[in-house]
């Protein structure tokens, strides 16, 4: 694992955006895996800024998001579809047909998951995958006790995750208890991974992910086995390394 430690969140966001930018400049037809959550918001701002400066285009880019809440439709402001529109897609020249986010309202979830995997394969696989990390070590929505061999599937969210994500909802009761998420196998098949973590509350899990045993109890620990992972951490998130 390559580890980059930045002074603060702004610097982390810029570094992450630079990696996306160089990917898009070097390969305008890239397939990018995007993540949601609070951490990548600064990165999206920087990407939009660079896009406006004419540094790259999204015209030929295909994107796949890691996950989506089960039961929320795209118009719901808490859906990850809405999030991606608000933070990135509405500002750039991406072809809407090239945006892929699991459909949380699909009637046949199993079919939706299989088709999602097929779409990734048809696009040629993911060149660059952005990840955040949950305090319990989840990536995407792959919660502890994960099956490493799982592909895109329906997951039940941990109490901790529901609590953590309730900050984006009016009340904890509104947080969906399930989600569709790329599996660990899907994530491990991506060519290059950049994981972002900011703040003191991520320090302990970052230490476990980097130095601890590879175990389903810490889903992100599997990344130790991926050949091309870069962690971008601010000083606080790196403080226990
Ligand atoms: C959610 C997302 C994850 C994300 C995590 C951490 O649960 N499904 O992809 O990494 O939250 O979020 P934050 O960056 O807000 O700490």
Image: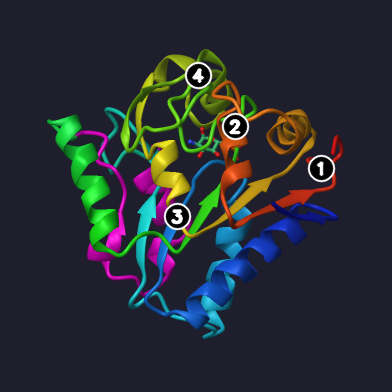
Disc 4 marks which residue? 145
Q: CA distance from mark 4 to mark 1?
A: 24 Å
Is mark 3 in CB contact (under 8 Å) with mark 2?
Answer: no
- State which quadrant residue 198 falls in: top right
Q: Residue at x 15, y 36 (%)?
A: 111
Helix or strand or loop: what does disc 3 sit on? loop
Helix or strand or loop: what does disc 4 sit on? loop
Percent coordinates x, y for residue 11 in the rendering: 76, 61
Disc 1 marks which residue? 238
Disc 3 marks which residue? 190
Percent coordinates x, y for residue 180 in the rendering: 33, 33
Answer yes or no: disc 2 within 8 Å of ligand 1. yes
Answer yes or no: disc 4 within 8 Å of ligand 1. no
Percent coordinates x, y for residue 170 in the rendering: 48, 24
Disc 2 marks which residue? 134
Residue at the far bottom in the pictured view = 54
5 left or right of 19? right
Query: Sequence-wise, which precedes: disc 3 or disc 1?
Result: 3
Q: Residues within 10 Å of mark 4 (few under 14, many from 20)?
A: few
Which circle, 2 or 4, is nearer the viewer?
A: 4
């Amino acid at each position: 694992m390559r580890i980059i430690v930045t002074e603060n969140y702004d610097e982390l966001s810029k570094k992450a955006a630079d990696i996306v930018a160089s990917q898009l400049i070097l390969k305008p037809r890239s397939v990018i895996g995007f993540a949601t959550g609070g951490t990548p918001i600064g990165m999206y701002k920087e990407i939009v800024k660079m896009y406006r400066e004419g540094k790259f285009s999204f015209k030929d880019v295909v994107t796949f998001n890691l996950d989506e809440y089960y039961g929320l439709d795209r118009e719901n402001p808490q859906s990850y579809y809405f999030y991606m529109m608000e933070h990135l897609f509405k500002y750039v020249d991406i072809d809407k047909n090239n945006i892929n986010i699991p459909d949380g309202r699909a009637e046949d979830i199993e079919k939706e998951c299989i088709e999602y995997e097929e779409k990734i394969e048809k696009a040629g696989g993911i060149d660059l995958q952005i990840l955040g990390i949950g305090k319990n070590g989840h990536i995407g929505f792959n919660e502890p006790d994960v099956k490493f061999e799982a592909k895109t599937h329906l997951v039940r969210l941990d109490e901790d995750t529901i609590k953590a994500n309730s900050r984006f909802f009016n009340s904890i009761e509104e947080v969906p208890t399930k989600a569709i998420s790329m599996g660990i196998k899907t994530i491990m098949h991506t060519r290059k991974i950049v994981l972002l973590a900011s703040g003191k509350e991520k320090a302990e899990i970052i230490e476990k992910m980097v130095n601890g045993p590879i175990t389903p109890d810490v889903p992100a620990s599997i990344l130790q086995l991926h050949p091309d992972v870069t962690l971008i951490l601010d000083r606080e998130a790196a403080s226990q390394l």
